[in-house]
Image (cartoon, helix red, strand yellow):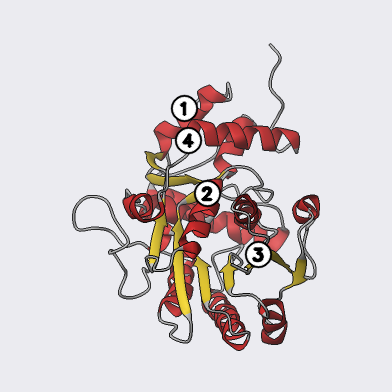
Amino acid sequence: MKPVVLGAAGFLGVNLVDALRDAGIEPLCGRRRRENVLPLRKRKVPMCIVELDEVDVLTEAMEGCDTVFHAAAHYPRYSHDYDEVIQLGVQQTQNALDGAVRAKVSRFVFVSTTATVAPAPEGASTEQHLFAQPPGYGLYHDLKWEMEQLVLTEDRLQTLVGCPAGCLGPWDLRVATSALIVAMARHVDPPHPDGIVNLVDVRDVGKGLVRMAQLDDPPKRVIFCGSSHQLHPLMEQLAYRYNAPQPSAPLTIAAAIALADAEEAKCAKEGGRAAISREIVDLIINSRVIDSSLAERSLGMEWTPLKDTLHAFDEFARRLRIIPPLDPG
């Protein structure tokens, strides 16, 4: 395999690069012109410029490669400007596909999300449960669905889709899925609704994507989910873990949506980070239990226990002072 990783400097991308190297594969690492690439420099990996708005640049980056891992799909900071965000995400995904075709790449692996997995009539949802149209749960869900559909319906090259749950683990420099964990570790009481959260160790996702790309006849779409939890009881466990006060009672769905919308509007105007984002609210209130047994059967996946994932995140986050050091007492 001669892969190029789009988004190699991101949270999932760095862990995918590590998984490829652990498998004896040296990837070409795509980076934006203006991006923090310290994690890649630390690994001394070959890098190339990748800009999703420039098909020629994408094509040049992909030439000589047989596999593209696309872990750089558009990720909106806020959940407004719906039409503009959807248009941008779809166009950038189309550009990546066009670049891969022009570069004569044979396999395109797209990193999506379990947000595109539809509810099952009964029991846990699997890869077979698809939305026939955008889910309508919010911008994040609809954007991810639109981009994933573009990849799934592409017929000029082989396309595969990995659908990871909420990723936790080392190298979450922007504190994405880890935001609630960081808040608890800092003894901040984060506002939250209650609902199901599906989680996975980001290192497992990297391994799974590599194994998926190595198979001669892989499944078209694979879910990566290590465990499912009710959020509020999980946060109570995190409070014990970080010796923090117990979290406040969950917000109602209406209150959580209203707060997230107000926070995002304020931050869009004044800067800063929302106390809770609309994306996170929409994910929590619309999630369902996920069955990831296809990954276990077809890829031989074994999931890292949550406690081990949290330990790895803590070590990383304390080293970078994202969370406080351990109390020596």
Q: Is residue 149 above or below residue 16?
A: below
| Quadrant of the rendered image containing residue 266 | bottom right
Give the Cα distance between marks 3 and 4: 25 Å
Q: How many marks?
A: 4
Question: Which residue type carries mark 2?
Answer: Cys
Q: Residue at x 55, y 81 (%)?
A: 97
Question: Which residue type carries mark 1?
Answer: Gln
Along the line of sight, the residue nearer the viewer: 192 or 320? 320
Circle 2/circle 4 CB separation < 8 Å: no
Mark 1, residue position = 237
Mark 4, residue position = 306
Q: Earlier in the sequence, mark 3 or mark 2?
A: 3
Give the Cα distance between marks 1 and 2: 18 Å
Question: Which residue type carries mark 3?
Answer: Gly
Mark 2, residue position = 167
Q: Is residue 212 above or below residue 94?
A: above
- Label 2: state its secondary structure: strand
What is the number of the mark on residue 145? Answer: none
Could you tell me residue 137's position as x and y percent? 39, 64
- Label 4: state its secondary structure: helix
| Quadrant of the rendered image containing residue 283 | bottom left
Q: Mark 1: few, some, or many residues within 10 Å (few <14, many ≥20)?
A: some
Circle 3/circle 4 CB separation < 8 Å: no
Q: Earlier in the sequence, mark 1 or mark 2?
A: 2
